[in-house]
Image (cartoon, rainbow, N blue to C red):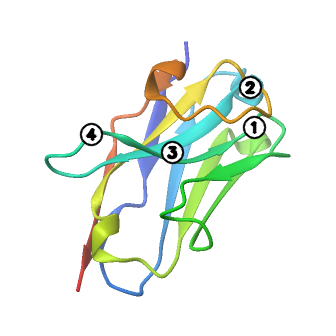
Amino acid sequence: QVQLVESGGGSVQAGGSLRLSCAASGRTFSFYAMGWFRQAPGKEREFVSRISRSGGSTYYANSVKGRFTISRVNAKNTVYLQMNSLKPEDTAVYYCAADFDGSEALRISDYEYDYWGQGTQVTVSS
C-alpha cells in the first residue's frame, strides 16, 4: 500500500511558476514509476508527465513539454513537478500517481496507475 499526498498548488498569474510535491508513504517508493495527471473542470483527467523508478526516463504531454519538469528523490520518497511559464489552460486539479510497473516505458492511461493522491488545485489567471 502506498499513500500519496500532494502539495504546492495555488493561484498564480500567467507566466508564473509553481512546484508541486508528492510525498509517498512506505519503503517501496523506489519500486514505482510516478506520474502526474490533471483534471480541469468539465474535462477528463489527462496525463501530464511520468518518471521511471530510476529517474532515468521522463515523459511529458505535448502541452507541457519544455515548460514542466518532473523529478524524484527516492531518499525522500518524493516526486516533484516544476511548472514554469504557466498558462490559464494549465488550471486544473493535479494528481500524482504511482505505477507498480516502474519501468522505463511510457504509460499514460490512468488505469495503469495503482495509487493516487487526493489532488492539489492549480489556478492560473490571465
Disc assigned to residue 36? 3
Q: Quadrant of the N terminus?
A: top right
Q: Residue at x 78, y 27 (%)?
A: 103
Question: Looking at the picture, does residue 34 appear above or below residue 125?
Answer: above
Disc assigned to residue 102? 2
Q: Nearer the viewer, mark 4 or mark 2?
A: 4
Q: Residues within 10 Å of mark 2 (few under 14, many from 20)?
A: some
How far apart in space, not on screen, are marks 4 and 2 (Cα)?
24 Å
Disc assigned to residue 52? 1
Q: Which residue is mark 4?
A: 44
Badge 2 vs badge 1, beta-carbon distance below 8 Å: yes
Q: Residue at x 42, y 53 (%)?
A: 7
Ranked by sequence position, the earlier of labels 2 and 3 is 3
Ranked by sequence position, the earlier of labels 4 and 1 is 4
Q: Nearer the viewer, mark 4 or mark 1?
A: 4
Kind of residue indicated by mark 3: Trp
Kind of residue indicated by mark 2: Gly
Q: How many marks?
A: 4
Q: Nearer the viewer, mark 3 or mark 4?
A: 4
Kind of residue indicated by mark 4: Glu
Residue 51 coordinates in the image, percent (x, y): 70, 43
Q: Compare residues 10 and 61 and report the one nearer the observer.
A: 61
